[in-house]
Amino acid sequence: MNDPKETILVWLTDEGTKTLLLFTLAVGLGLASLAFFFDGTSGSPTRTEFSLLVAAMVVVFYMTLRTNTY
């Protein structure tokens, strides 16, 4: 029988899984920023919302650099 830790390690080192997890992280950060914006009372974005959007953009930028082959 396979070791569960080894199975998880193999699953996490798969390129498809990494891409899916990073994309899910970027979408989650963007949706959290949107939720904070609609939940907030001010009419303009706060520092938290802006930071979440920047973090989502950084994750997407990292994904494009990581998957780009020259």
Image (cartoon, rainbow, N blue to C red):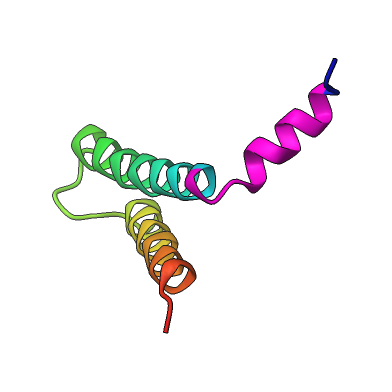
Q: What is the span of residues highlighted in magenta in the rendered image? A: 4-16
- Residue 1: where, in percent of width, then height? 85, 15
Counting from the top left corner in percent of width and height, residue 55 is at: 43, 59
Q: Left of 57 or right of it: where is 37?
A: left
Residue closer to the observer: 45 or 59: 59
Splitting the image into 4 quarters, where does residue 56 fall? bottom left
In the displayed structure image, the side of residue 59 where residue 30 appears, left or right: left
Residue at the extreme top of the image, as rendered: 1
Q: Residue at x 19, y 46 (%)?
A: 42
In the rendered view of the protein, which quadrant contains the C terminus?
bottom left
Where residue 27 sits, quadrant-wise, is top left
Residue 37 lies, in percent from the top left, at 23, 43
Q: Residue at x 43, y 77 (%)?
A: 69
Question: What residue is at 44 percent from the left and 43 percent from the top?
Answer: 20
Magenta includes 7? yes
Image position, residue 58 (x, y; %): 42, 66
**In this rendering, is residue 41 above or below 64?**
above
Secondary structure mostly seen in magenta is helix
From the viewer's perspective, is 43 left or right of 39? left
Choose top left, top right, bottom left or bottom right for residue 63. bottom left
